[in-house]
């Protein structure tokens, strides 16, 4: 795939179904309801980004500004289709999202990652390096306490302050 032909843009409600299809076809991701993805593409459109290639959605990042700390962008989910992996698309999407409109004042990025999710650790480690920012990690949601042993523990990743 030629990454220079990928269009990165703000999602709209009309993209919700395609985003849901993308996420539900990536086995490693937790699926959401179509309604959830519609809300992400409409209510949280300014803190999300969509990647299109030849008219198809090949990437999506959803996020939101944390109510208690609005200078923090919490990245909810990163989805890249199998045909678009390995070309730096996720990193490009994150950097463009941080450079857009209401995210320019963001000083920190947070997300959660399971211990064994090597691609996500690599992505957010790369982001920290590109933004010359420290990366901290701490347990946020414990497998036994929060997930009744039905999901791996989630570690909070905090990057910042960002220098871009």
Image (tube, grey):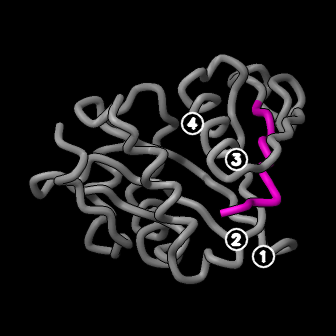
Which quadrant, please, contains the C terminus? bottom right
Residue 155 lies within the magenta run = yes
- Mark closest to the chain's N terminus, 3 or 1: 1
Distance between the Cα atoms at labels 3 and 2? 12 Å
Please say if the residues under marks 3 and 1 sit with CB atoms less than 8 Å apart.
Answer: no
- Mark closest to the chain's N terminus, 1 or 4: 1
Q: Mark 1 points at which residue?
A: 70
Q: Name the residue under label 2.
A: 65
Residue 45 lies within the magenta run = no
Q: Name the residue at 61% across, 52% down.
A: 76
Number of marks in the rendered image:
4
User: What is the span of residues highlighted in magenta in the rendered image?
Assistant: 154-164
Please say if the residues under marks 2 and 4 sit with CB atoms less than 8 Å apart.
Answer: no
Which quadrant, please, contains the N terminus? top left
- Mark closest to the chain's N terminus, 2 or 4: 2
Q: Name the residue at 31% across, 44% down.
A: 22
| Residue 156 or residue 99, whichever sits in front | 99
Q: Mark 4 points at which residue?
A: 123
Q: Which mark is in front, 3 or 4?
A: 4
| Residue 26 or residue 161, whichever sits in front | 161
Residue 145 figure quarter: top right
Q: Mark 3 points at which residue?
A: 111
Q: What element carries label 1?
A: strand
Please say if the residues under marks 3 and 4 sit with CB atoms less than 8 Å apart.
Answer: no
Q: Name the residue at 24% across, 53% down.
A: 57
Instruction: Give x and y (percent) for residue 67.
Output: 79, 74
Residue sitting farthest toward the bottom: 101
Distance between the Cα atoms at labels 1 and 2? 5 Å
Please say if the residues under marks 3 and 2 sit with CB atoms less than 8 Å apart.
Answer: no
Distance between the Cα atoms at labels 1 and 4? 23 Å
């Amino acid at each position: 795939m030629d990454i220079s032909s990928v269009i990165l843009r703000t999602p709209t409600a009309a993209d919700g179904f395609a985003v849901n299809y993308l996420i539900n076809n990536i086995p490693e991701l937790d699926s959401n309801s179509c309604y959830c993805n519609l809300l992400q593409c409409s209510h949280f459109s300014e803190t999300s980004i969509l990647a299109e290639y030849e008219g198809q959605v090949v990437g999506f990042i959803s996020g939101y500004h944390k109510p208690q700390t609005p200078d923090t962008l919490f990245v909810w989910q990163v989805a890249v289709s199998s045909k678009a992996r390995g070309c730096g698309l996720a990193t490009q999407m994150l950097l463009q999202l941080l450079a857009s409109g209401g995210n320019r004042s963001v000083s920190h990025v947070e997300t959660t990652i399971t211990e064994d999710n090597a691609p996500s650790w690599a992505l957010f480690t790369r982001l920290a390096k590109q933004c010359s920012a420290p990366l901290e990690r701490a347990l946020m949601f414990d497998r036994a306490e929060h997930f009744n042993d039905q999901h791996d523990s989630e570690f909070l990743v905090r990057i910042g302050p960002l220098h871009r």
